[in-house]
Image: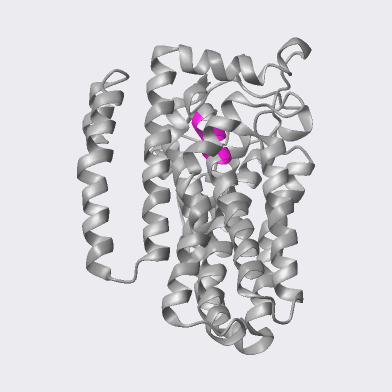
Amino acid sequence: GGQVPWSRAKRQGDAKELGGWADVQLASPRREDPPRDSSETLEYVPYVFPSEPRCYHYLMHPFRQFGSYLGAMSHAFGWRFVFMCCAAYGANQGAGEEYLDFAAIYYFADTLKVSPSKGSAIRGVVSIPWQIKAIYGMMNDMIPIYGYHKTPYIIIAGGLGVCAWLFLSALPAPNAIAATALLVLGNFSIASPDVTIDAAVAERARTHPHLAADMQALCWGSLGVGGLVAALSAGWLKEIIGTRGIFGVCAATAAAILLPGCMGFLKESREPVERRNRSCANIKEGFSDPVAKNVFITAIIVTLCSLSMGLMEMLVELWWVKGVYALGVSFIIVAPSLWFFLRRVNPVLAKAS
């Protein structure tokens, strides 16, 4: 890719005043990039700070810099993908998870009327979708649906989330088992798209390595802003619409990824016909590849250990027993497994893990 054309810079000194985005280089789309139509490519004009600024320019400078940042991201990856990242991290995960955690506290006590110990057990079960995130990644890689590896999983997760949150907001007083099942589906609608969008971001980071850090800033920034907005408004919403009303808001956050997914905002390439029904063959190929095999085994071990700690949280009330078990699993099973299997992939990765 070439240097961004600073068409509005009148002299060399102006270009030095542009700030952090003066050195951005936008690579031309490579062969591995997802296809983008012409309507998705926006004309990108970088923001130039005036050579003779006034007070107004200083006040608007952060906002215009942020607009320039979004313009650079949209120019490189397409505005639909940028919107999908903001919806997944900001609305669905940032705001949705914050609303869920806040509403669940009052839902267990006021609606289900369960004891604190039973509420802790329910939270252990509800967190299971987060403990098996590695399985979602393996399924995305090896089991395509109608030739697509990511979009169908986002649609399924978003649809289940919308239904679960609407049922929780509409049912006046479900039993604890039904409520727990719906909360599990709600957590699944947040955890599964998180893995899928993470994979999409990683793919684009490989094709645009100079923008990898900026993509991470977009994702984590959206997550922080969404969580902050939800944290500031959760108590106010609780007083106005109640706990079940907050679950209705969670349905809107799940719809924030469902609708873009249905509209194909990921622009995912479809696999050829001859490779669409090879799920079993893909699994065999994955476990026969020496690198992928070690990664998959590590993911399965970590998933099983996470599930066991979730069950321990659900079944055991003594805090010191849970603490000893967690430390034992971490140092006796997880750490040696990470070192043994991942050092065959990358010694640095094994040490960090």
In the rendered picture of this protein, how many numbered marks are placed on residues? 0
Q: On screen, 255 above or below 282?
A: below
Q: Is residue 198 magenta?
A: yes
- Nearer to us in this view, 347 or 121: 121
Q: On screen, 178 above or below 265?
A: below
Q: Is residue 189 magenta?
A: no
Q: Is residue 340 visible?
A: yes
Q: What is the span of residues highlighted in magenta in the rendered image?
A: 196-202
Query: Is 65 on the left-hand or right-hand side of 257?
Result: left
Q: Residue at x 69, y 71 (%)?
A: 168
Q: Could you tell me residue 16's position as x and y percent? A: 38, 38
Q: Give the farthest residue toward the bottom.
A: 239
Q: Residue at x 62, y 59 (%)?
A: 186
- Report the magenta stretch's main SS: helix
Q: Residue at x 70, y 62 (%)?
A: 164
Query: Is 35 on the left-hand or right-hand side of 218?
Result: right
Q: How is the image coloured?
A: one colour
Q: Is residue 6 visible?
A: no
Q: On screen, 90 above or below 231?
A: above
Q: Could you tell me residue 178's position as x and y percent? A: 66, 68
- Nearer to us in this view, 312 or 67: 312
- Nearer to us in this view, 168 or 49: 168
Quarter of the image with the C terminus in it: top left
Q: Residue at x 23, y 22 (%)?
A: 347
Q: On screen, 57 above or below 209?
A: below
Q: Could you tell me residue 189's position as x and y percent? A: 63, 53
